[in-house]
Amino acid sequence: MRIAWRTLPPLALLATLLGVWELYVDLGGVDGVILAAPHQVAQAIFEDRSLLWSNFLVTMQEVGFGIALAAPVGVALAVLIHLSSTLRGAAYPLVVASQTIPIVLLAPLLMLWFGFGILPKVIVVALVSFFSIVVTTLDGLAGVDPQMLKLMRTFDASRWRTLR
């Protein structure tokens, strides 16, 4: 296995940071209960790998459901905003303003309304994902080469066909 020379500086920095962290904890800079040493973290990961794996699978399911909810709604809203200047003026500021509300404040409300099941977690993931999906889809739609749009008009393509 050959390591590229450009990967050595990041690896050296990582090794240095881990070494400093290990020395800091070992030399009594902080209580081990507050900050565990890197070797203790690695040992705990190894010893509890089955528990971590099962929790990872549950988390990935929640993330998958959240993105599956946010993606179609976000893309649909972005397309509607792209097609309607009225909707752009009305909805886009609200989408941007929605990012000023910390999810940390919404999470307890979601737990209160929906309980401790999977639904509030899926909603949190959907809310976190929604903004970036809308904004990047809008950016992609706005970034289409004008010459391509002109070509579609030349071929007498409908608005829907041009969008597709």
Image: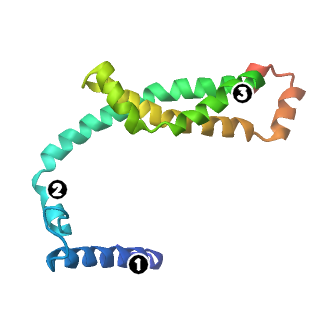
- The kind of residue tagged 2 is Ile
Badge 1: residue crowd in 10 Å (few <14, some 14–19, many ≥20): few
State the residue at coordinates (70%, 35%).
Answer: 141
Q: Is residue 13 left or right of residue 137?
A: left
Q: Is residue 23 left or right of residue 12?
A: left
- The kind of residue tagged 3 is Arg
Question: How far across and down, in percent of the image, does residue 56 sit?
Answer: 25, 42
State the residue at coordinates (71%, 27%).
Answer: 88
State the residue at coordinates (44%, 30%).
Answer: 126
Lower position in the chain sequence, tag 2 or tag 1: 1
Lower position in the chain sequence, tag 1 or tag 3: 1
The foreground one among 107 and 161 is 107
Quick check: marks 2 and 1 in contact, CB under 8 Å?
no
Q: Is residue 21 left or right of residue 129?
A: left
Q: CA distance from mark 2 to mark 3?
A: 48 Å
Residue 88 bears which disc, if any? 3
Residue 80: quarter of image: top right
Q: CA distance from mark 2 to mark 1?
A: 26 Å
- Quadrant for the C terminus in the image: top right
Number of numbered discs: 3
Question: How far across and down, in percent of the image, does residue 82 sit?
Answer: 72, 28
Lower position in the chain sequence, tag 2 or tag 3: 2
The foreground one among 24 and 74 is 24
Which of label 2 and label 3 is nearer to you? 3
Give the residue at mark 2.
45
Quick check: marks 2 and 3 in contact, CB under 8 Å?
no
The foreground one among 32 and 163 is 32
